[in-house]
Amino acid sequence: MTRLEAVQGDVTTIEVDAIVNAANAQLAGGGGVDGAIHAAGGPSILEECRRIVAERGPLPTGQAVVTGAGDLPARHVIHTVGPIWGQHTEAEAVELLASCYRSSLDQAMAHGCRSVSFPAISTGVYGFPKDLAATTAVAAVREWVEEHPDALDRILFVCFGADDLERYERELA
Ligand code: ADP
């Protein structure tokens, strides 16, 4: 059984095997979750990101790659690129966001992780509406879990604010 939980907090302090980063295509760091992860994890994560982009180019929206987690209390960081709201049709944006969650879980499973935490991908500077993002995230994760029963023990939705916690608790109820 895989448990799905919503918690309020900062992604960098949560103890799980892999934390998912809401990255950009260049894996170049930035603000929000991305900035917090690199600030807390130290320079080794960014070095690995640079090597990945040098080898394979920018990461397409909806895909995910794995690096080490530096000083974070996790083994891996899974970097995924969410859709920028307004750059796609609504249906495409929903599918790309769902793909971020599915691809991240595929990577977690491939790296032998048992627990994964997600931020609310695309809902910061990328502007994705928060209700639609939460519905999409929970539906995509539930679908993946049905297809991969027992692959993971825990999947956490880490909510930065009380409004997001309420939103995710409603979705998970
Ligand atoms: P994106 O560029 O994908 O929109 P952001 O990092 O700007 O990503 O924001 C994604 C979401 O993560 C927002 O809802 C934001 O409030 C939240 N957030 C920002 N910092 C953190 C953090 N340290 N831990 C958890 N969530 C965070």
Image (spheres, helix red, strand yellow):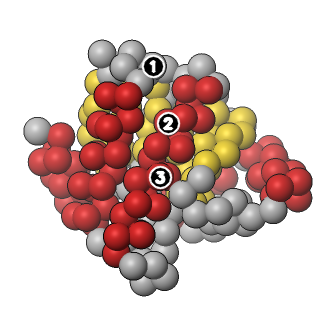
- Give the amino acid type for the residue marked by disc 3 in the picture: Ser
The amino acid marked with disc number 1 is Ala
What residue is shown at x 39% (from left), y 16% (from top)? Answer: 150
Quick one: 78 or 71, which is closer to the camera? 78
Q: In x, y percent, where is residue 96?
A: 46, 61
- Residue drawn at (41%, 24%) of the image: 148
Identify the residue position indicated by label 1 in the image: 151
Image position, residue 25 (x, y; %): 67, 66
Can residue 65 be seen in this snapshot? yes
**Alpha carbons under labels 1 and 2: distance apart:** 9 Å
Is 75 positioned to the left or the right of 122 in the image?
right
Q: Residues within 10 Å of mark 2 (few under 14, many from 20)?
A: many
Q: As displayed, is residue 123 above or below residue 134? A: below
Q: Amino acid at mark 2?
A: Leu
Identity of the residue drawn at 32% across and 38% down: 143
The residue closer to the viewer here, 154 or 7, is: 154
Name the disc covering residue 10, or none: none
Q: Quadrant of the N terminus?
A: top left
Q: CA distance from mark 1 to mark 3?
A: 18 Å
Q: Crowding at label 3, few (<14), some or many (≥20) Cα neighbours within 10 Å? A: many
